[in-house]
Image (cartoon, grey):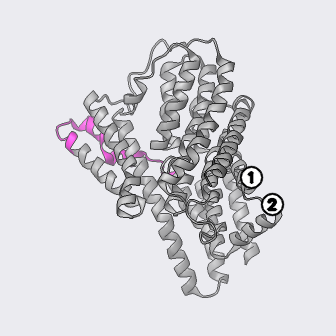
Amino acid sequence: MLTALVVIFILAYACIALEHPIKINKSASALIGAGLLWTVYALNGGDPHVIGENLRESVAATAQIIFFLMGAMTIVEVVDAHNGFRVITSRIKTTKITSLLWLVGFVTFFLSAILDNLTTTIVMISLMRKLLDKHEDRLFFAGIIVVAANAGGAWSPIGDVTTTMLWIGGQITTLAIIEGVFLASLACLVVPLLFLSFTLRGQQVVAPKACAKGEGHGVETSTFEQNLMFCMGVGALVAVPIFKAITHLPPFMGILFGLGVVWLVGEILHLRTEESKKKHLTLVAALTRIDMASIVFFIGILLAVATLEHTHILTALAGWLDRAVGNQAIIVTIIGLLSAIVDNVPLVAASMGMYDMTTYPTDSFLWEFMAYCAGTGGSILVIGSAAGVAAMGLEKIHFFWYARHIGALAALGYFSGIFVYIIQYKLMH
């Protein structure tokens, strides 16, 4: 049985990694893989009662992550529909391209920590289309946006799916991950920025002759509506860690509570809005625009990894790695590099099952370092993260262009952050 489970998982994983060449959506591969794995486990695993309990436990853990993601994605869609991100983008004004590069890098870095790296990438690349006319300039900016978004998401419990998974799973806590990983993430961004500044030095910002009138979905909103919904949306997201600290309830309860508040405010705000405009701005409309394919993928891959955890395959793998490699820092660094090739969600999910929290307690070196490496390693290749894939589609970035101009800088930033984290950890512990 164990051999069959490993073979099925590897095949499903290969299909996920090769999504674009084989033209099969990774969500389908993840669901089929999860279905086959649980079927084999159920038919050969022994006691049906124990297997049923294991499944209920896995579904409960998966549901917490899914509810959180759905709530966060819907809130962001509502803010975007009201053009709320103009609150940030309208304040970016400079004529030097290097100054704009640093400004965009740091805005992306901090915005990604509050929202998430995928949403921030989409927002910032949309902004670049309004600020830069030359496509070559926008390509470099798109590259630094991917690096900054992934670096920013790594030090925040709500900034990246993998960090969120570790946070919800109890492997990390809010203040500890911020204190532990912030400087490493900052180094991961600053080093590529320094090198790219030399590449683009002396150039001026060439603005497009005509700018699109608005973001969002083509519906104009008042300044009051933009500011209100931006503050409500960001406030709801930022309040989740505070809610968890005070109530000790799971984060998904906080995000659902915040979603309800944003929904109520939106309904009151548009009581007298004409129906043709209102239908684009309501939370009901936002629910139809969230990326359900990604949600379904997370469900499939998390349930698939759960079978390997319940059959103790991951525990055995962790033991083999410890014996073969020995150094925990090297093992996690390799996992981070692998996330540039394959999706970091199943990598982190597998790691959570590989290592027991009795041996590696909350906020230990392993989990904090895992959050950094899995979050930032994907920047090395354009297909290595959700942010990179989004940028690739929006700006038509070629795989080899990114590898040649951005990949080496991202790798340099990645290892710079590793150096900073290890030095900081040794000084503090």
Which portion, as a residue range, is magenta? 268-293
- Disc 1: which residue: 334
Residue at x-position 54% and y-position 41%? 152
Distance of label 2 from label 1 (alpha carbons): 11 Å
Give the mark nearer the N terminus: 2 vs 1.
2
Vertical order, 169 against 278 (above or below): below
Q: Amino acid at mark 2?
A: Val
- Disc 2: which residue: 325
Vertical order, 142 against 47 (above or below): above
Q: Position of residue 383 (x, y in %)?
A: 66, 42
Q: Nearer the viewer, residue 189 or 305?
A: 189
Can see residue 23?
Answer: no
Vertical order, 65 against 20 (above or below): below
Q: Position of residue 113 (x, y in %)?
A: 49, 43
Q: Nearer the viewer, residue 11 or 166?
A: 166
**Residue 368 covered by magenta stretch:** no
